[in-house]
Image (cartoon, rainbow, N blue to C red):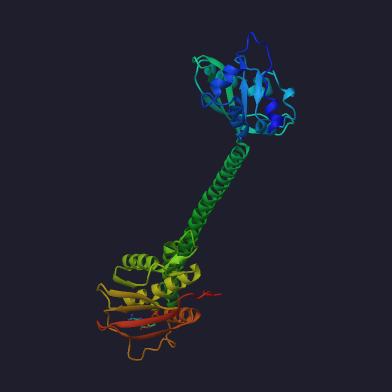
């Protein structure tokens, strides 16, 4: 501690400078204590502490300050103007703070100043007046704390935040583009369905008098239900999967309206149950065939009631479709049915790792039970 303390001796014109002893007495927190005590206190501070004359020239710097500023010898800076040690940018702030100190007020600011050896540093600077015993301001005390680490960390955080913001903006833009693209694809799929349906209906009308005409009409109806299934396939954007309960609820309601039937949906499948889009499409088509049959074979000139039930148990899903029609014919054999509907249902049920059984509903109509795996992966006609 001895050497740095030496460097604190104030040199200057005795006429213009306050008496060193008076000044130290004013600095001394313990009235009447040794002046050396004050200097020791200043010297032991981790901050860079400087005593300035009122004109801003440097007359003392504590040893930690010299260390922080990478000054080897106080004589290098003794009597130098404090602001000259700072970059031009900070001069206004320094002049301002010194003017405030001369008027008896303390000011604090943050500024950049490299060390004597050019190491970049940021400082939290407090500039305050040093008064004589009679209250007049005799010197200025400037305490600078090295906040380079804090400022650098803050800067890094700011840069990281800016990078993150840019990344989020890019992702949002990509998502928006994807949404537009999906909308466009959706639109085209709908248009394609509509064109195919219109063409088939036209052909069915041309061949209305032969059996082929009825078959073509059936195909048109089937594609109509396919397009309805497509319309209800709303993917959960986060998972890319379909929430089964919501999907079946929307589809049954839509089919009920389209077929002019009373379709009641009783759901016992938790919302957490999601299926992949191709399985959803298969389930949709299967339900469309069964509900279509209930209406088609449920009795002419009456409004059929159809009950659809869905439940999940462990790895399996169960779908039940019942109606209040006349019931299945006595010789009904789904494997032997001439229509395409039963075949489609059987194939899909098998592809989804399950089977379809049939029977009678409590209302005396037909009942179909489809028991399938919850996460069937590859489904569809190839
Ligand atoms: N819900 C039902 N009620 C009564 N009969 C039905 C029902 N579903 C299917 N069937 C009988 O099964 C047959 C085969 O059905 P499907 O394969 O869909 O052919 P399509 O409906 O074209 O006749 C039907 O013709 C009908 O006799
Ligand atoms: Mg049918």
User: Exactly how many numbered labels are in the figure?
Assistant: 0
Which quadrant does ligand 1 occupy?
A: bottom left
- Residue 96 falls in image quadrant: top right
Q: Where is residue 31 in the image (x, y as percent from the top left)?
A: 51, 24
**Where does residue 310 sit, x and y in percent of width and height?**
36, 75
Q: Where is residue 154 in the image (x, y as percent from the top left)?
A: 58, 40
Determine whether 75 is above or below 286 in the image: above
Residue in front for this viewpoint, 331 or 255: 255
Q: Residue at 61% x, 31% y: name it.
A: 40
Residue 209 visible in the shown view: no
Q: Where is residue 164 in the image (x, y as percent from the top left)?
A: 57, 46
Q: Front-most of 358 and 52?
A: 52
Most foreground residue, 340 or 314: 314
- Taking 40 as reference, is 354 left or right? left
Is residue 318 found left or right of 326 in the rendered image?
Answer: right
The image quadrant where one finds the N terminus is: top right
Position of residue 295 in the picture relative to residue 62 (left or right):
left
Identified at 52% across, 56% down, the residue is: 185
- Regarding residue 147, the answer to whether it shows in the image is yes
Q: Residue furthest bottom?
A: 331
Q: Which residue is drawn at 66% across and 33% down?
A: 64
Is the C terminus in the top left, top right, bottom left or bottom right quadrant? bottom right
């Amino acid at each position: 501690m001895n050497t740095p303390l030496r460097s604190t001796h104030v040199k200057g014109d005795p006429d213009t400078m306050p008496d060193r002893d008076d000044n130290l007495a004013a600095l001394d927190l313990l009235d009447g204590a040794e002046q050396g005590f004050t200097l020791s206190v200043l010297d032991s501070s981790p901050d860079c502490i400087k005593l300035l004359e009122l004109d801003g020239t440097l007359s003392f710097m504590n040893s930690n300050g010299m260390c922080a500023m990478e000054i080897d010898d106080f004589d290098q800076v003794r009597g130098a103007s404090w602001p000259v040690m700072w970059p031009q940018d900070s001069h206004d702030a320094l002049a301002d703070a010194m003017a405030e100190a001369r008027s008896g007020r303390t000011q604090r600011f943050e500024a950049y100043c490299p060390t004597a050896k050019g190491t970049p540093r940021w400082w939290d600077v407090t500039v305050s007046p040093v008064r004589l015993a009679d209250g007049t301001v005799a010197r200025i005390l400037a305490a600078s704390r090295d906040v380079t680490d804090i400022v650098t960390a803050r800067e890094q955080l700011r840069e990281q935040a800016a990078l993150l913001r840019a990344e989020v903006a890019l992702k949002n833009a990509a998502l928006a583009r994807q949404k537009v693209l999906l909308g466009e694809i959706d639109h085209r799929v709908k248009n394609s369905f509509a064109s195919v349906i219109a063409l088939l209906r036209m052909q069915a009308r041309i061949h209305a008098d032969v059996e082929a005409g009825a078959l073509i009409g059936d195909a048109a109806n089937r594609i109509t239900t396919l397009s309805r299934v497509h319309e209800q396939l709303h993917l959960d954007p986060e998972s890319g999967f379909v929430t089964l309960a919501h999907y079946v609820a929307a589809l049954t309601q839509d089919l009920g309206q389209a077929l002019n039937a009373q379709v009641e949906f009783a759901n016992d499948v938790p919302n957490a149950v999601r299926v992949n889009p191709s399985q959803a499409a298969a389930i949709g088509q299967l339900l469309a065939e069964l509900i279509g049959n209930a209406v088609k074979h449920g009795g002419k000139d009456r409004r059929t009631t159809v009950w659809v039930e869905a439940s999940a148990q462990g790895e399996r899903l169960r779908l039940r479709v019942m109606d209040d029609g006349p019931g299945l014919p006595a010789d009904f054999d789904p494997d032997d049915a001439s229509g395409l509907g039963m075949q489609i249902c059987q194939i899909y049920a098998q592809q989804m790792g399950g089977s379809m059984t049939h029977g009678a509903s409590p209302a005396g109509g037909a009942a179909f039970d489809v028991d399938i795996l919850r996460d069937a992966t590859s489904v569809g006609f190839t």
